[in-house]
Image: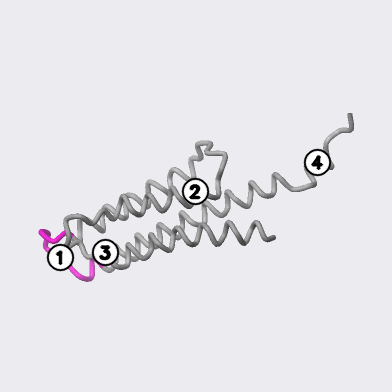
Amino acid sequence: MADESAWRRDIKHFLDGARHRIRHHTGLYADEDLVGAVLHACRSAEAGSVPDRLPDALLEEARREVAARCTRLVQAADRFAARDIAEVAALRVQALAAVDRFQDVVMQKCRLREAGQSGGAFLRRRAL
């Protein structure tokens, strides 16, 4: 159980940083790289919790969705674009929801990995 709480805490820590960046993104500064920062947090959360690094379609889809939502938020909040506050707020909520879905996928993958490493798998093996 301690391992489960540790990887839950790590995943939440990395993705809370991404959520903070999304909530506070203004689009006013040229050096803001929201998409890169959020995807870096997603990769960090995934690397710390999913060591096998096998390609997973569900995880890839969740990562693409996060990138797409953040890109739309960046475009809507751009300082040179016509900024609609309601649209920016709606896109911000959608980006946060995409990060939440990514967190759910990563945690589900961790749970499946932990279930595969339980002691029951060793008990079911045939004796030598």
- At label 4, counting other C-alpha atoms closer than 10 Å, the crowd grade (few under 14, some 14-19, many 20 or more) is few
Residue beneath disc 3: 25
Q: Are marks 4 and 2 in contact (CB under 8 Å)?
A: no
Residue 109 rendering spot, x and y as whole percentages: 57, 48
Distance, label 3 to label 2, CA atoms, is 23 Å
- Tag 2, which secondary structure? helix
Three-letter code for the amino acid on which mark 4 is drawn: Phe
Residue 115 rendering spot, x and y as whole percentages: 69, 49
Q: Nearer the viewer, residue 16 or 80?
A: 16
Residue 79 rendering spot, x and y as whole percentages: 13, 61
Image mark for residue 46:
2
Image mark for residue 83:
1
Residue beneath disc 4: 122
Distance, label 4 to label 1, CA atoms, is 59 Å
Residue located 51% across and 40% down the image: 56
Q: Nearer the viewer, residue 87 or 128?
A: 128
- Tag 1, which secondary structure? loop
The scheme the figure's colours follow is: one colour
Three-letter code for the amino acid on which mark 3 is drawn: His
Image mark for residue 52:
none
Q: Which residues are magenta?
A: 78-88
